[in-house]
Image (cartoon, rainbow, N blue to C red):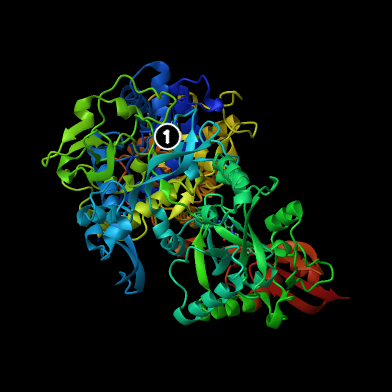
């Protein structure tokens, strides 16, 4: 029987990250030094671990997919090219060669026939094709379907051709400039607004130093670029976005089924940030004296008709996680960008409001929501009416409320929300406590936990959780609100203004003046790939114009069959694009007709074991799960999750426990280690340092230690006194005695179980014990030596192959069967147990391990030393603890 392990895509060389870039840590380093550093710091350890698992699996007769490839597009490669004047293609392939050499030097058993690079045209052709799949898909939250396990599911990505077009599509989607009443154009615009890949003109993270926009995931909490630490600004630019938010719930719940470190799951869950609360509608008082009447009318209408999908123009819809605090709302805040602001702002307040809006536009979301920052805001002059108690409360604009979250508007409850309290104190707004903390030690004001309602009319005394449910239901019945869910996750900004990336397979339609009409057409599948044009000058000009915008005209323009002038999209895809799906291509990298053959996909996927760094938790690992789910919904892959089991290897620190870096001068070069100690020593040491997932400091003494062990293992079998490599005379065709058999089978069992647990360090200790024991044996059964060499092979393949030959084998041990152990031989037949008299050790007596208490007593009494001790004494009691000891309690 063939056993499938599908150890696909275990290791992945992010070659794009190895160039000296703007990161000060790498300043001045040449690329080969960087290769060395990255290899040593993060990769060699993970690569060795997966290689051990793969070699072990092969020896167990499993079918193994163990590939290697290069994620080689990206900023660092381009930056390096700009600095040195060499084309990124040239340096990328040079670096790949160097990295491949180092990997081969370390004896990793990759299937090199499956090698891929994300920069190869026949690879990125399919990256572009998958992008077009995203473009061709919309997410239907109500679609019902049954999954492979027979479970009823709701929500699925569906072909855009199945999107129902509303009858009034012209009215709702007719944009300025379209020929009046053109249903076809309006339909296209409507479809474009719902695709998983869409264009948006929104404020984005623009990094002037890197000359590109960045995804939220690439900006640090301090508002700097993840790469290089450069300031990031807000700017409104037309960008491609991927609608990852449509998959938020599935990205969250489907995490439950994968075997990943809890820490990574927590990072993803927090990043997705699901929050459950309620939406509540507040009637805006338009300063008309008859307002109380119109409020009453509105309420009556709502009670009759229920909650509308969208609030009326004079109604402010807020999102709150604490509907139980409604009675404590003393003001409202809308985001400065909110549509309602223009309409509600009074003449007296207009100038101040406009000035404030201008300033807020320049700040990043992180800046705006920072708790430590002083609260700022401006009163709009308008008031809202609280639906539960009809209190008239002022509406402010303030930048701590984000337009991109919830409804972009809040009811503020200063008594029970930190930011609101600070704001209320700054602007002298009343604070009404509505939750009793239930403890004399905890003030109600400032209490953000759950308690019981106070100052809340008929609801007084209701516990927080009960109140939340109750009020949501009551608001819903009155047509004034409903329970609602929000996610922190934002759509993925998917375009970059750089040369060294995948071109988008997209054309823009131009009007007669050569301006964009806003309508786009995808490149036909059979015209893929859209290759990067040859360009010598791709240095960013400090403006958001992408380098491809000055590509040759033959590349940039074309006339469609109907005569429409078309211009190519000139942004490029971000570095993450290629690595979103590489694990699929490894399984079928030569397929010219499809990105992966469905049968091949079913055979190999999902990836059984993926070892990688924790730094990818909310980047690569979230992005590729999203792409995979879209491909799954469109029927191109057979599972909803790409990576079944994930392990994070711990980083290796410098000798002095600091991060390895050139400036600290503590970088270990694998080339040097291999020259001085050999590849097997490096591999073995990487695994012996400690548990795989822990951060560990490098120690050259440690390498010497495992090197000495390999020497002992060699001399265990080989006669080192003679020139020729021959077996030493202790190694004979002999049977093992009981003790030797026990040591051998214990070692086989221990190493096997340790590899299964990925506990490589303890597996190595067990092989060390074995070596020590058999070095003391005058007769070393050849069969035991063979088993030992097979156990050693996944860890130290080079020396193991040589020893295998010395033991008389002409063929490689790669596919030799993994040794089996016999549990019965491990059980010790006899043990030597201490025998005490009145608690004092008087003798040691050999006994069968399974001796019962009576036998133990008999054997102890038969011992000469014990007989002497017991003579003439009165035995009061005999205590026999099986496998442990015997104690005689005597008197007289
Ligand atoms: C009233 C309230 C009372 C709130 C209270 C909290 C405590 P999470 O859990 O992160 O979803 N909020 C809603 N939309 C916002 C936006 N666009 N920008 C900034 N803040 C926003 O947080 C939801 C809470 O954050 C909401 O609940 C709202 O404040 C605020 F005692 O409403 B709360």
How many dots with numbers? 1
Q: Position of residue 105 (x, y in %)?
A: 38, 30
Residue 149 picture quarter: bottom left
Helix, strand, or loop for circle 1? loop
Q: Position of residue 150 (x, y in %)?
A: 32, 74
Q: Position of residue 138 (x, y in %)?
A: 31, 58
The quarter of the image holding the N terminus is: bottom left
The residue closer to the viewer here, 590 or 217, is: 217
Q: What residue is drawn where x is 39% and y is 27%?
A: 77
Residue 854 picture quarter: bottom right
Is residue 351 in view from this perspective?
yes
Compared across the picture, whether 545 is left or right of 169 comes to right
Quarter of the picture for ligand 1?
bottom right
Mark 1 surroundings within 10 Å by alpha-carbon count, few (fewer than 14), some (14 through 19), many (20 or more): many
Is residue 278 in view from this perspective?
no
Q: What residue is drawn where x is 59% and y is 80%?
A: 470
Judge whether 381 appears above or below 553 on screen. below
Judge whether 679 appears above or below 274 on screen. above
| Residue that carries the numbered disc 1 in the rendered image | 718
Q: Is mark 1 within 8 Å of ligand 1?
A: no
The quarter of the image holding the C terminus is: bottom right
Residue lying farthest to the front in this orientation: 289
Compared across the picture, whether 448 is left or right of 731 comes to right
Q: What residue is drawn where x is 63% and y is 45%?
A: 352
The residue closer to the viewer here, 263 or 415, is: 415
Compared across the picture, whether 805 is left or right of 839 comes to left
Judge whether 771 appears above or below 597 on screen. above
Residue 356 picture quarter: top right
Q: Position of residue 268 (x, y in %)?
A: 50, 54
Q: What residue is drawn where x is 31% and y is 39%?
A: 808
Residue lying farthest to the top in this orientation: 85
The residue closer to the viewer here, 167 or 482, is: 167
């Amino acid at each position: 029987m063939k056993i499938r392990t599908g150890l696909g895509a275990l290791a992945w060389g992010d070659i794009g990250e190895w160039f000296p870039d703007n990161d000060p840590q790498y300043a001045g380093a040449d690329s080969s030094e960087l290769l060395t550093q990255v290899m040593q710091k993060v990769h060699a350890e993970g690569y060795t671990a997966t290689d051990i698992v793969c070699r072990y699996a092969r020896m167990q007769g499993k079918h193994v997919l163990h590939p290697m490839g290069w994620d080689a597009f990206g900023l660092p490669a381009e930056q390096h090219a700009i600095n040195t004047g060499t084309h990124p293609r040239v340096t990328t392939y040079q670096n790949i060669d160097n990295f491949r050499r180092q990997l081969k030097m370390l004896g990793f058993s990759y299937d090199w026939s499956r090698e891929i690079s994300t920069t190869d045209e026949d690879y990125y052709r399919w990256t572009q094709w998958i992008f077009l799949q995203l473009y061709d898909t919309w997410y239907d939250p109500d679609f019902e379907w049954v999954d492979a396990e027979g479970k009823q599911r709701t929500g699925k990505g569906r072909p855009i051709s199945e999107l129902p077009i509303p009858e009034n599509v012209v009215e709702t989607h007719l944009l300025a400039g379209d020929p009046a009443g053109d249903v076809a154009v309006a339909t296209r615009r409507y479809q474009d607004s719902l695709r998983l890949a869409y264009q948006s003109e929104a404020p984005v993270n623009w990094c002037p130093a890197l000359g590109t926009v960045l995804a939220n995931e690439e900006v640090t909490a301090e508002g700097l670029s993840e790469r290089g630490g450069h300031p990031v600004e807000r700017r409104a630019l037309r960008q491609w976005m991927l609608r990852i938010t449509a998959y938020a719930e599935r990205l969250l719940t489907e995490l439950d089924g994968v075997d990943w470190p809890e820490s990574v799951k927590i990072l993803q869950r927090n990043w997705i940030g699901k929050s459950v609360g309620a939406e509540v509608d507040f009637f805006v008082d338009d300063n008309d004296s008859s307002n109380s009447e119109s409020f009453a009318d509105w309420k009556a209408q709502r009670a009759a008709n229920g909650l509308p999908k969208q609030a009326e123009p004079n109604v402010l819809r807020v999102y709150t996680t604490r509907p139980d605090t409604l009675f404590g709302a003393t003001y409202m805040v809308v985001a400065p960008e909110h549509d309602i602001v223009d309409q509600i702002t009074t003449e007296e307040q207009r100038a101040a409001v406009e000035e404030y809006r201008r300033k807020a536009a320049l700040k990043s979301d992180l800046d705006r929501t920072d708790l430590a920052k002083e609260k700022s805001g401006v009163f709009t002059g308008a008031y809202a009416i609280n639906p539960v108690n009809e209190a008239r409360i002022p509406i402010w604009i303030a930048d701590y409320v984000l337009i991109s979250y919830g409804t972009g508007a809040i009811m503020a409850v200063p008594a029970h929300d930190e930011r609101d309290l600070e704001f209320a104190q700054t602007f002298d707004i009343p604070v009404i406590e509505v939750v009793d903390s239930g403890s004399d030690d905890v003030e109600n004001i400032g209490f953000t936990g759950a308690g019981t309602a106070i100052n809340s009319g008929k609801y007084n005394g209701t516990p927080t959780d009960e109140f939340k449910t109750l009020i949501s239901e009551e608001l819903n019945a009155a047509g004034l609100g409903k329970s609602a869910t929000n996610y922190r996750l934002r759509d993925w900004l998917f375009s970059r203004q750089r040369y060294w990336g995948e071109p988008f397979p997209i054309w823009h339609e131009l009007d007669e003046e050569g301006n964009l009409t806003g309508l786009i057409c995808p490149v036909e599948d059979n015209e893929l790939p859209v290759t990067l044009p040859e360009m010598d000058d791709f240095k960013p000009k400090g403006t958001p114009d992408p380098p491809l915008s000055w590509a040759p005209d033959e590349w940039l323009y074309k006339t469609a069959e109907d005569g429409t002038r078309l211009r190519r999209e000139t942004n490029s895809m971000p570095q993450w694009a290629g690595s979103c799906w590489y694990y699929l291509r490894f399984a079928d990298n030569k397929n010219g007709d499809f990105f992966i053959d469905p049968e091949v996909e079913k055979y190999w996927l999902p990836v059984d074991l993926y070892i990688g760094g924790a730094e990818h938790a909310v980047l690569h690992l979230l992005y590729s799960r999203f792409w995979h789910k879209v491909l799954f919904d469109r029927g191109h892959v057979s599972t909803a999750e790409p990576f079944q089991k994930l392990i994070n290897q711990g980083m290796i620190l410098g000798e002095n426990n600091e991060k390895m870096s050139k400036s600290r001068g503590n970088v270990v070069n694998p080339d040097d280690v291999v020259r001085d100690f050999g590849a097997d020593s490096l591999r073995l040491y990487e695994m012996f340092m400690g548990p795989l997932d822990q951060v560990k400091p490098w120690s050259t003494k440690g390498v010497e230690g495992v090197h000495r062990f390999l020497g002992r293992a060699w001399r265990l079998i080989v006669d080192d006194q003679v020139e020729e490599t021959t077996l030493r005379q202790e190694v004979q065709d002999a049977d093992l005695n009981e003790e030797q058999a026990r040591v051998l089978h214990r070692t086989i069992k221990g190493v096997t179980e340790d590899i299964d647990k990925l506990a490589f360090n303890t597996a190595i200790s067990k092989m060390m014990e074995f070596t020590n024991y058999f070095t003391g044996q005058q007769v070393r059964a050849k069969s035991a030596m063979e088993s030992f060499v097979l156990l050693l092979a996944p860890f130290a393949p080079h020396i193991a192959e040589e020893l295998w030959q010395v033991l008389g084998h002409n063929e490689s041990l790669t596919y030799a069967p993994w040794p089996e152990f016999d549990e019965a031989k491990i059980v010790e037949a006899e043990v030597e147990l201490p025998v005490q008299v009145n608690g004092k050790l008087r003798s040691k007596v050999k006994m069968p391990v399974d001796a019962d208490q009576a036998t133990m007593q008999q054997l102890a009494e038969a011992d000469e030393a014990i007989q002497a001790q017991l003579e003439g004494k009165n035995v009061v009691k005999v205590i026999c603890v099986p496998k442990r000891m015997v104690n005689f309690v005597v008197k007289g």
